Image (tube, rainbow, N blue to C red):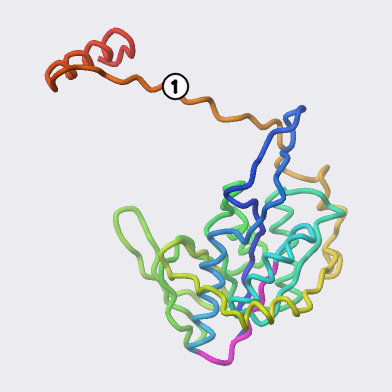
Amino acid sequence: MKILVFVKQVADTEARITITNNGRSLEVENKYALNFFDEFAIEEALRIKERLKDVEVVVCSYGPKRSIEALRTAIAMGADRAVLIDSKDLDTDDPLITAKILSGFAKGDGFDMILCGKQAIDDENATIGPMVAEMLHIPHVGLVTKIETPEGGEVRVDRDIEGGRQTVKVKLPCLLIVQKGINEPRVPLITGVMKAMKANIPVLDPATYGIDVNSCTKEEAKVKVVRYESPGGRPPVKFIEGATAEEKAKRLIKVLKEEARVL
């Protein structure tokens, strides 16, 4: 059995991010990490491998060459191999193009199951998984919180729904989108880190898998950034003074009526 896991390298949550003068792009401090939700997908693939034994876990990312560091994290956790599809010549983050490239890799490399994290924490698109599944013509399930051991050409999963939980059976091959709570990602052992440092991670051109790169340019993108804007500043905090709780309550009501005008 082969499990593919699609991951993304994103800006670290502590990285400094500023908007350029033209408002069309971002300047990101050189601090990057494996996407938070993708760690759950890798961990779940490794747990399935531990139960079934005869499983290969392949981790793939589409991005710039610095994304190799995120793939080394996956190797350190226990993935068998990793592949980077270089985005240098395409220079686009359009989710449809990303899905087209990842689905092309899946067709060429082969798979029985694809796991994805719920979303990337940088753009919050949460659309790559479903689009890849549609392009591959395979079933997909989102918001997955439990994956049982695949058996008999199908897998049983639990997923969150409004006000409850749903259990479904999905025929393989399939794509599952996992979310926080499905597991607790492992911390790589030093032996895994050493293995990851020595691992040879191939960097491939998108055309390697027969993808028409002419249809994956900025000009062909369906989603284009118009501009970035900073979130509005927080209003100043107003402290309500008073000798007693009753006095503070009266002043608060007065502020809500006369200044905030919400009463």
Question: The C terminus is located in which quarter?
Answer: top left
Look at the image and tell me in which quarter the N terminus lies.
bottom right
Secondary structure of residue under mark 1: loop
x 72%, y 29%: residue: 23
Residue 208 within the segment the image draws in magenta: no
Please tell me in which quadrant of the rendered image residue 117 appears.
bottom right
Magenta segment boundaries in residue numbering: 52-60
Residue nearest the viewer, comparing 141 with 256: 256
Verify whether residue 59 appears in magenta.
Answer: yes
User: How many numbered badges does the structure rendering display?
Assistant: 1
Q: Furthest residue to the front?
A: 243
Q: Is residue 155 above or below residue 34?
A: below
Which residue is the extreme one toward the top? 258
Say if 123 sits above or below 250 in the image.
below
Q: Residue at x 55, y 30 (%)?
A: 231
Q: Is residue 143 found left or right of 132 in the rendered image?
A: left
Q: Give the quarter of the image for residue 9.
A: bottom right
The spot of residue 206 in percent (x, y) is 82, 63
Q: Which residue is mark 1?
A: 235
Question: Residue 90 in the image: x percent, y percent?
Answer: 84, 52
Residue 156 image-quadrant placement: bottom left
Q: Position of residue 121 (x, y in %)?
A: 57, 51
Q: Is residue 167 above or below residue 129?
A: below
- Amino acid type, callout 1: Pro
Which of these two is toward me, 48 or 236?
A: 236
Q: Residue at x 34, y 19 (%)?
A: 238
Q: Position of residue 57 (x, y in %)?
A: 62, 80
Binning the other alpha carbons within 10 Å of mark 1 as few (below 14), some (14 to 19) or many (20 upward) gives: few
Return the residue found at the far bottom: 54
Question: Of residues 79 and 18, which is closer to you in this image?
Answer: 18
Q: Residue at x 76, y 27 (%)?
A: 21
